[in-house]
Amino acid sequence: MGIVKIDDELHEQVRRASTVMCRSINAQTEFWIKIGMLAEANPALSFTDIIKIQLDAADAGMAGRTEAA
């Protein structure tokens, strides 16, 4: 584990997003880093595709669910 220096404005954006997403600032930052890394490695995939693949890999049992379910 280490300390990462980020711009104050980016930190504020993370703080705001973390509040909306009910995550800690660190968890929100980790989420954005992970999704960003996966997006760079898989440029043909959409955000939705990346999330679905991650849910399937975690066996979260949410694949194919809709809001009506």
Image (cartoon, rainbow, N blue to C red):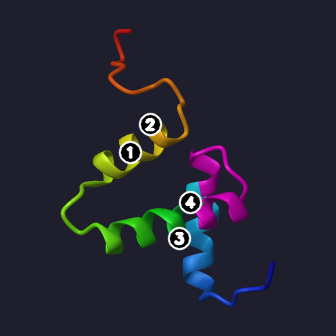
Q: Is residue 59 above or below residue 32?
A: above
Question: In this figure, which residue is indicated by the disc labeled 3?
Answer: 33
Q: Is disc 2 in contact with disc 1, using a CB cutoff of under 8 Å?
A: yes
Nearest to the observer: residue 7 or residue 33:
33
Question: In this figure, which residue is indicated by the disc labeled 2?
Answer: 56
Mark 1: amino acid: Ile
Which quadrant: the N terminus?
bottom right
Q: Residue at x 54, y 30 (%)?
A: 60
Of the two numbered discs 1 and 3 on the same chain, state the one appearing first in sequence: 3
Of the two numbered discs 3 and 2 on the same chain, state the one appearing first in sequence: 3
- Residue farthest along the top direction in this orientation: 69
Q: Which portion, as a residue range, is magenta? A: 18-30
Eye-nearest disc, 4 or 2: 2
Q: Is disc 3 in contact with disc 4, using a CB cutoff of under 8 Å?
A: yes
Give the CA separation, mark 4 to mark 1: 14 Å
Residue 24 horizontal/vertical position (percent): 73, 55
Nearest to the observer: residue 6 or residue 56:
56
Q: Can residue 54 be found in the magenta stretch?
A: no
Of the two numbered discs 4 and 2 on the same chain, state the one appearing first in sequence: 4
Q: Is disc 4 in contact with disc 1, using a CB cutoff of under 8 Å?
A: no
Of the two numbered discs 4 and 1 on the same chain, state the one appearing first in sequence: 4
Question: In this figure, which residue is indicated by the disc labeled 4?
Answer: 31
Q: Is residue 44 left or right of residue 38?
A: left
